[in-house]
Amino acid sequence: MQEHTDDTAALDACPPWCGRDHRAGLHPDDQHHASRPRRVALVTGDPALDPDDLAVPGAVVARLFRRTDSEQTWLEVVSEEGRDVRMVATLDSAGRLFAVLRDLLSAASP
């Protein structure tokens, strides 16, 4: 287990989207950069196997995350409750996924 630290590097290089308080003395895992979580309501299901009326409402939480010892920023999207949805991707990968989702939504719009 890592000890508490007084490393101020997290605060010095804090990205503008980071919503964390990087006080001295926090556990190193609590000093990583994280945006404020964004909650999104979703309806999920398995339309290939189940009828539409078995779809369930739920929510996911999305946030940006970066370790203090890294330059790589990640997008994390996880179920607010349970483990139905879990995706963690680099920003480049998330951008490619966003482009595909935008195209699919555009194609599905009347």
Image (spheres, rainbow, N blue to C red):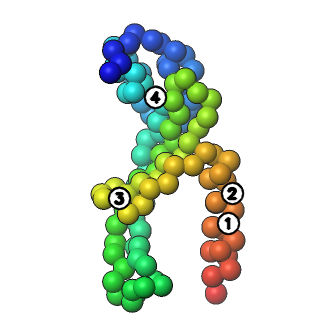
Q: Quadrant of the N terminus?
A: top left
Of residues 102 and 110, the one nearer the viewer is 102
Q: Position of residue 17 (x, y in %)?
A: 54, 36
Q: Residue at x 62, y 53 (%)?
A: 94
Q: Position of residue 66 (x, y in %)?
A: 53, 34
Side (left or right) of 109 relative to 11 = right
Q: Which residue is mark 3?
A: 83
Q: Which residue is mark 4?
A: 32
Which numbered disc flags the more N-terminal residue, 3 or 2? 3
Q: Type of residue at label 2?
A: Arg
Pointer 2 with pointer 1, Cβ within 8 A: yes
Q: Which residue is mark 2?
A: 96
How many angstroms separate mark 3 from mark 4 (CA)? 23 Å
Q: Position of residue 74 (x, y in %)?
A: 56, 42
How many angstroms separate mark 3 from mark 1 (CA)? 24 Å
- Mark 4 residue element: loop
Pointer 3 with pointer 2, Cβ within 8 A: no
Which numbered disc flags the more N-terminal residue, 3 or 4? 4
Q: Quadrant of the C terminus?
A: bottom right
Pointer 4 with pointer 1, Cβ within 8 A: no
How many angstroms separate mark 2 from mark 1 (CA)? 6 Å
Q: Type of residue at label 3?
A: Arg
Q: Residue furthest left?
A: 81
Q: How many tags in the picture?
A: 4
Q: Quadrant of residue 101?
A: bottom right
Q: Type of residue at label 4?
A: His
Q: Residue at x 61, y 45 (%)?
A: 90
Q: Which residue is mark 1?
A: 100
In the figure, 110 relative to 87: above or below? Answer: below
